[in-house]
Amino acid sequence: MIEAVVIGAGPYGLSAASHLRSAGIDTRVIGEPMRLWRSHMPDGMMLRSAPRASSIADPAAKRTLARWATEHDVVIPAVVPLATFVRYADWFREHEVPEIDRRRVTAVSVQDAGFEVELDDGERLRARRVVVAAGPEQFARRPPQFGGLEPARVLHTTDLKDLGGFGDRQVLVVGAGQSALESAALLNEAGARVEIVARKPAINWLPADDRDGEAAGGGGAGHVLTRLRRGLQPPPTGVGGRATGWLAVAPEIMHRSPAVVGRVVRARCMRPAGSAWILPRLGGVRITMGRAVTRAVAVPGAVRVEFDDGRTREFEAIVLGTGYAVDVRRYSFLTAELLATLRLEGGAPVLGRGLESSVARLHFLGAPAALSFGPLVNFVVGTWFAGPALVDHVLGRRGHANFPIPPK
């Protein structure tokens, strides 16, 4: 029986495996390395996180982005290109997790003293512990008004890779978050005729020194918050602003906080927003805020879109920058019997210490852990919490404060 099977070989899977193996725990990693980043993100994309917050955690803190750059004579700009990050992640994997099983997991079921993990070629493994670190592409939110349309016409941002075929096409991008805005910029640069529409009244632009735009004016509580923020530096994690960011920086504290605190911090740190460096790249892009798409139907060679003000337009392609809605029931490999015993809240697992679910020795890392541990675990920087917390729990250690402050 394998001690631990890690499902997924992205930043969280690689980091978890690095920590588990360093602790002497027999660990098998199953998945295509960095599949989400290689296959479900468009060429030319940039990371929203700053360089310091873009390192994958290893136990000795020696596989940082900065160290990779030094060893390979690479200059890391203030905005990290996706291609650079993937090269760094490959270096991390080669040193920390060189052996990866690239088959696909088709089923995970509870067995006598652990789990049975079935692979796409029919082989079945027995594991004492399973760590789910799969990417969030299964959680892509696709509003129902776009249902039934052919995939070539309506794509989620996770479906974009090569944008070369969009030249001179009329494209509508729905949404005003980072993925929507950056996709619109890349499409614009690829020669598409791009429009953006979003329900929110305005785009929330993130300045370089204040991550979530928590501007608060007026008197009373807002005035107090403004004074507090001015006395704080943004957290080194790059998640959240000067107030919520310092709450989000400690996932263990978030885990113990009242539910209302978690809701407020998640809402502030994860609301749709775009990095200010995107704005100059949207020249010529028509942006309509405060409008929603109510209906979309296929017409010859296009999609006819009806807006909530009664107007109709036709576009050759629709790109949905509508984010993600975590629901682990959409993981095809979790069996119905296992899901029936898994405690969920709105599709997200309710997790305890070590990011363990209500099913003993079944752990969830990344986006599914945000309900229990706050917004930090949606980002690469959250690996600095998840890896140590997982190993401390597996080994029965009390652990430490688990403040995920990555090294410079």
Image (spheres, grey):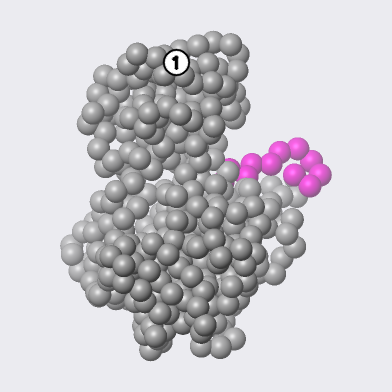
Q: Report x, y in % for residue 226.
A: 69, 47
Of helix, strand and loop, which mostly describes the magenta segment? loop
The amino acid on which the numbered mark 1 sits, given as a three-letter code, is Arg
The residue that label 1 is drawn on is 304
Quadrant (top left, top right, bottom left, bottom right) of the C terminus: bottom left
Q: Is residue 322 on the magenta stretch?
A: no
Q: Is residue 322 above or below residue 194?
A: below
Tell me what residue is drawn at x 29 percent, y 48 percent.
39
Q: Report x, y in % for residue 392.
A: 52, 83
Tell me what residue is drawn at x 40 percent, y 71 percent.
117
Tell me what residue is drawn at x 64 percent, y 41 percent.
215
**Element marked by disc 1:** strand
Q: Which residues are magenta?
A: 212-222
- Evaluate whether residue 320 shows in this view: yes
Quadrant (top left, top right, bottom left, bottom right) of the N terminus: bottom left
Q: Quadrant of the rendered structure where residue 261 is?
A: bottom right
Q: Is residue 218 on the magenta stretch?
A: yes
> Which residue, as the protein is rendered here, is positioned at the far right?
220
- Pick the front one: 1 or 210: 1
